[in-house]
Image: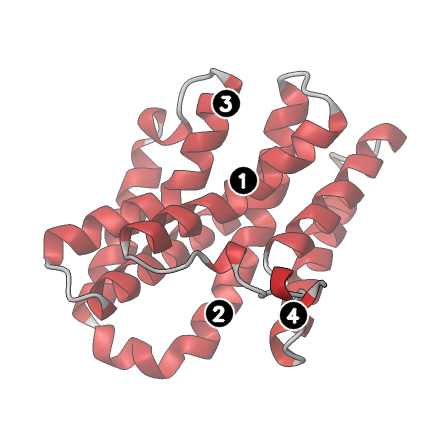
Amino acid sequence: MLEALDYIGLVAFAISGVLSAANRNLDILGGYIIAFITALGGGTIRDLLLNVDVAWMTSFYQILVVIGGASFAILFRGRLRYWRRTLSIFDTIGISVFTIIGVQKGLAHDQIPLIAVFLGMITATFGGLLRDVLCNEIPLIFKDEIYAIPCLIGGSFYLAGDYLGIENTSWFLWVSILIIIILRTLAVIFSWKLPLIKQFK
């Protein structure tokens, strides 16, 4: 089930990448490139930091899923404009799943707890960071949006389960994912913001 949700996250991020590329008037090739970077960038950075094989380079299915999501976005870009709220939901599911996957991989490679949590956040958010930089925008993670914090909180909660020996139980996995989804959704609904640097005197 986690693998299926992983694919949903890849599709959501691929669509997000294409929409961002379209807004910057990029061509079709540029759209596919941005889609790949958005969907796979975070996991790539995580694997490079861990000095292990990059996941998508050994998974033909991940590449196909991203191509499918990007192609769908290119073909139905006009209609997707009306589905932005739905897309936001899938994006939220994507970051929640990718956070847990990142924490799992960090723990599997004997990283200290704090690093494992940061690897989860990187997996979930750095693809979007690269997308925004390439599209000449301030990355969402650097704005006052509550975006990375739910990943850090959910990743820390999952890490606590590792100490208790229940991290691999399905119910705890779903609770960890749900925490991120709820926090991110509430942040969007109630427009929760982080204070800006210039507000401190």
**Circle nearer the N terminus (3, 1):** 3
Q: Residue at x 47, y 78 (%)?
A: 85
For the residue pair 89 and 135, the one nearer the viewer reads as: 135
Q: Which mark is residue 88?
A: 2
N-term-proximal mark, 1 vs 4: 1
Figure check: 173 above or below 185: above
Q: Secondary structure under badge 1?
A: helix
Q: Are marks 3 and 4 in contact (CB under 8 Å)?
A: no
Q: Nearer the viewer, mark 3 or mark 4?
A: 4
Q: CA distance from mark 1 to mark 4?
A: 20 Å
User: What secondary structure is found at the residue carrying circle 2?
Assistant: helix
The residue that appears at 15% across and 66% down in the rendered structure is: 25
On screen, residue 53 above or below 175: above
Work out whether mark 3 precedes mark 4 in sequence or the reverse, and give the earlier one.
3
Specify few, some or many for label 4: CA neighbours under 10 Å numbering under 14, 14-19, or 20 or more.
few
Alpha-carbon span between mark 2 and mark 3: 28 Å
Q: Which numbered disc flags the more N-terminal residue, 1 or 2?
A: 2
The answer to whether any part of residue 1 appears in the image is: no
Quadrant in the rendering for residue 138: bottom left
Q: Quadrant of residue 135?
A: bottom left
User: What distance separates the C-alpha of mark 3 from that of mark 1?
Assistant: 10 Å
Residues at marks 3 and 1 touching, judged by CB atoms closer than 8 Å: yes
Residue 71: % across, % down: 20, 58
Residue on which the image places disc 3:
49
Which residue sits at x=33%, y=38%? 61
Amino acid bearing label 1: Ile
Residue 104: image location, x then y, percent? 64, 31
Identified at 68% across, 24% down, the residue is 107
Residue wearing tag 4? 193
- Tell us which disc is closer to us: 2 or 3: 3
